[in-house]
Amino acid sequence: MPADRFSTATRLRALGTQAAERVYRARGRTVRTPRRSRLTGRAALLALVVCSLVVALAYPMRQYVSQRSEIAEQQRQAEHAREQVKRLREQRARWQDPAYVEQRAREHLHFVRPGETGYTVRDGTGGARRPADRDPDRAWYQNLWDGVDKADTGG
């Protein structure tokens, strides 16, 4: 025999169940038996452990993903910087060549060698040209003097 068969709580529970059955029978209803929870103590503990692990690992995983993206961005920037350094070294090597320097001076500054005659040819379109102070097709000194004249007139 179980030890709690005659305990007060067991008797009250049995009396409560019997009383409920009588009331429901009197009204013509069926007695509903209380359902037992499917969640056992072990299952609740397992769910708590899983939730704790998810919460504990969420922040480190987020940090890991963000750091990986930062590393990838830094690698892209480093590659871009290497390409830029390569271009600048090539440009520096070109500027070491006197023929290249002379070509650039003739093209942009309209320099001529001693004994040569320099000509400035206008294209004759008359309109649709950039402002005189920014026109690369004009001689540098014309752009300079136009800028001085423009500053003198306040325009």
Image (tube, rainbow, N blue to C red):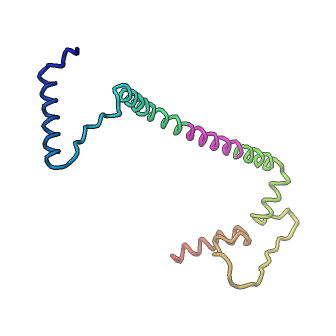
User: What residue is shown at x 29% (from left), y 37% (from top)?
Assistant: 35
Identity of the residue furthest to the right in this view: 115
Looking at the picture, does residue 42 appear above or below residue 67?
Answer: above
Q: Main secondary structure of the magenta part?
A: helix
Res 138 quadrant in image: bottom right
Looking at the picture, does residue 107 appear above or below residue 13?
Answer: below
User: What residue is shown at x 24% (from left), y 42% (from top)?
Assistant: 32
Q: Position of residue 67 (x, y in %)?
A: 53, 36
Assign the N terminus to one quadrant of the image. top left
In this view of the protein, which residue sits in the foreground, 135 or 44?
44
Q: Position of residue 41 (x, y in %)?
A: 34, 26
Judged left or right of residue 40, residue 115 is right
Res 78 quadrant in image: top right
Looking at the picture, does residue 128 appear above or below residue 35?
Answer: below
In this view of the protein, which residue sits in the foreground, 144 or 11?
11
In this view of the protein, which residue sits in the foreground, 103 or 69?
69
User: What residue is shown at x 69% (from left), y 68% (from top)?
Assistant: 141
Looking at the picture, does residue 71 appear above or below residue 100?
Answer: above
In this view of the protein, which residue sits in the foreground, 55 or 138?
55
Judged left or right of residue 75, residue 52 is left
Indicate yes or no whether the magenta region holds residue 93.
no
Res 93 quadrant in image: top right
Q: Position of residue 8 (x, y in %)?
A: 11, 22
Indicate yes or no whether the magenta region holds residue 75.
yes
Tell me which segment is drawn in magenta.
68-83
